[in-house]
Amino acid sequence: MVSTAFYVLFLLLLLNGLNSVNFDQNEGKHEGNIIETINDFGFDLLKIFDQDKEMKGINLFYSPTSIAVALAMVFLGSRGNTADEIAKAMKWYVYESEDVHLTLKSLMEAIAESEHANLELKIANRLWGHEYLHETAEYKESILAFYNTPIAKVDFKEGSERAREEINQWVEKNTGRKIKDFLPPGSVTEDTRVALINAIYFQGTWLHAFDREKTHHAPFHTVGDGERVLEVSMMTKTSRQSYHVDEEHNCQILELPYDGDDISMLIVLPNDILGISSIEQLINTELMEKWIMSFVKTTVKVSIPRFILSQHFELKKTLSKLGISDVFEAGIADLSGLSSVESLYVSHVIHKAQVHVNEKGTEAAAASGVIMQKRSVEMYPEFYADHPFLFIIYHKSTRAVLFIGRVTRPEIAEQGHFTAETKEKPNTRHYSDELEACDPISVFHVSRPSEVARYCPSAMRECRESACLLTTKKLVTLPTFIPRQILEKDVFQ
């Protein structure tokens, strides 16, 4: 089966403080869902990443849930304007602070219950404090009650390297031994007073597996520093899936559930090769819910590339754009809820995440590829991810977004392990040669609408209004009940 593994770490190094909550609860009170605020926070981060020149157009992977849990542990120890900024950025100001922490506690418990033989999902939290740190009794009790997080005492001042090694050992243990040496030498210093770590580890298999024998070399259009075409390993299957075409936002959405059917991956594929940025600016919890409610179970031919994403970045700048700034300023941060003796502040916010999607394990039964006859044709919608797409891993029973990712450059195709049938399909590099002088009527046969739109937009405009088939000779209009797909096989000679 296809296996997906995530290793997510969120680290806060606090030099001067953490506090409990004390802000005006009466302003703007209304009913809502705290989990939705965490999801929207994740989508807000996506919009900021999309607008960042350094982040735009590159692979991206992070965990809104992991970041939110770590921020909540800081929020638990914050007071005054420091607490207000976190509450407003997270949209928690409309709730009682205790409700925020109780919701996260319940969420972590619900996620833990999703584990079974073919799915492993763990969330672990840990706080390391300097051995002479005077944490408040309230914080010590609350962080254990809400987040199951004991406070481990270490000597940061005289034994910073030993403390770093201890933290790294904990990280390795709680990520399935996959993340080693998380904190590099020199990252923990004698000035460190508190280290907060949240780790998420996930590994699961698809409910409906891909057949490795059908994986083949295929072109993938990248974006960013000039558009390029890469050859990637494309996984393919035809099976019944939850599928939706969003004509308003010009994209397709597919749900791929994991074994156990409580964790799913949503893949959002723009119809336009360069359309991912517009989707990132529009997506929010409301739109995601609308997609889920609009799903129809139907047979879909699915093609997605293998991909490996790894991310390690500092989030202080990003969080500041959401209005969280005081907590990072020495002498300004009010974290007296954690320690009323020392003046602490957050020095680093480091998030590390990794995802690996490929074929593993037992082969499961799947429908064969679409076979078309000359006049009697059974056609399935095709979800062909040959250009940048978004994916969302969410917990179905709570609707919590666990991970958000953007794939712009999948792994390069490996040699071998591919079937001969893929060699018969046209290669994207040939399309431009055939379509260079195209007109609305005479178009070389291609396999996907995206290729027609790319190389012969005039023909695509004529084809868009009604379902049609492009052949080497002419445009053939088909009955309107036929899906609007450019067929992979020639129907007419």
Image (cartoon, grey):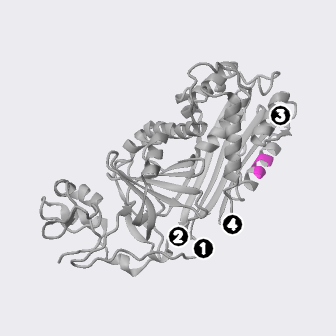
- Give residue 34's quadrant in the image: top right
Of badges 1 and 3, the one in the foreground is 3
Magenta segment main secondary structure? helix
User: Tags 4 and 1 in contact by the CB under 8 Å rule?
Assistant: no
Q: Secondary structure at mark 3?
A: helix
- Which amino acid type is shown beneath numbered disc 1? Gly
Q: How much space separates mark 4 and mark 3, taking CA atoms?
A: 34 Å
- Residue sitting at x 32%, y 77%: 371
Q: Is residue 168 magenta?
A: yes
Q: How much space separates mark 2 and mark 1, taking CA atoms?
A: 9 Å
Query: In the image, is residue 107 above or below residue 457?
Result: above
Q: How much space separates mark 4 and mark 1, taking CA atoms?
A: 13 Å
- Which span is picked out in magenta? 166-170
Badge 1 is on which residue? 361
Q: Secondary structure at mark 2?
A: loop
User: Tags 2 and 1 in contact by the CB under 8 Å rule?
Assistant: yes
Of badges 2 and 1, the one in the foreground is 2
Q: Which mark is residue 117?
A: 4
Image check: 180 left or right of 224? right
- Which amino acid type is shown beneath numbered disc 2? Ala
- Residue sitting at x 77%, y 34%: 194
- Residue sitting at x 66%, y 47%: 9
Q: Is residue 396 magenta?
A: no
Quarter of the picture containing the N terminus is bottom right
Badge 3 is on which residue? 141
